Amino acid sequence: MDIAGRAFIVTGGASGLGEGAARMLAGCGGKVVVADVQVDKGQEVAPAIGGVFVRCDVSQEPDG
């Protein structure tokens, strides 16, 4: 799969497996949106990988 230049939304991207996936995708040249309820952690991870953070709770319909 060609990741470079493509956009990805990673839910739960502020920690754990989601963070790992976000870092891997960004490391391969992907443009990453880190979506998570953990605002502090998301605002830390997203800029570190050149991504964007969005506060999102996928269990809540208005956020999803």
Image (spheres, rainbow, N blue to C red):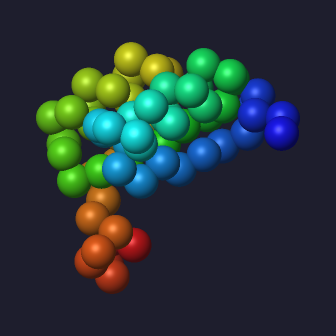
Q: Residue at x 38, y 22 (%)?
A: 47
Q: Residue at x 26, y 25 (%)?
A: 44
15 to 61, vertically: above or below: above
Residue 54: percent from left, percent from top = 35, 48
Query: What count of labels does the image hold?
Result: 0
Residue 25: percent from left, percent from top = 60, 31
Q: Residue at x 40, y 40 (%)?
A: 17
> Residue 47 or 13: which is nearer the viewer?
13
Using the rendered view, name the quadrant where residue 13 is placed: top left
Residue 37: percent from left, percent from top = 22, 53
Q: Residue at x 27, y 65 (%)?
A: 57
Using the rendered view, name the quadrant where residue 3 is placed: top right
Residue 32: percent from left, percent from top = 54, 37
On the rendered structure, is 53 left or right of 10? left
On the rendered structure, is 52 left or right of 8? left
- Which residue is farthest bottom? 61
On the rendered structure, is 59 left or right of 29? left
Question: Which quadrant is the C terminus positioned in?
Answer: bottom left
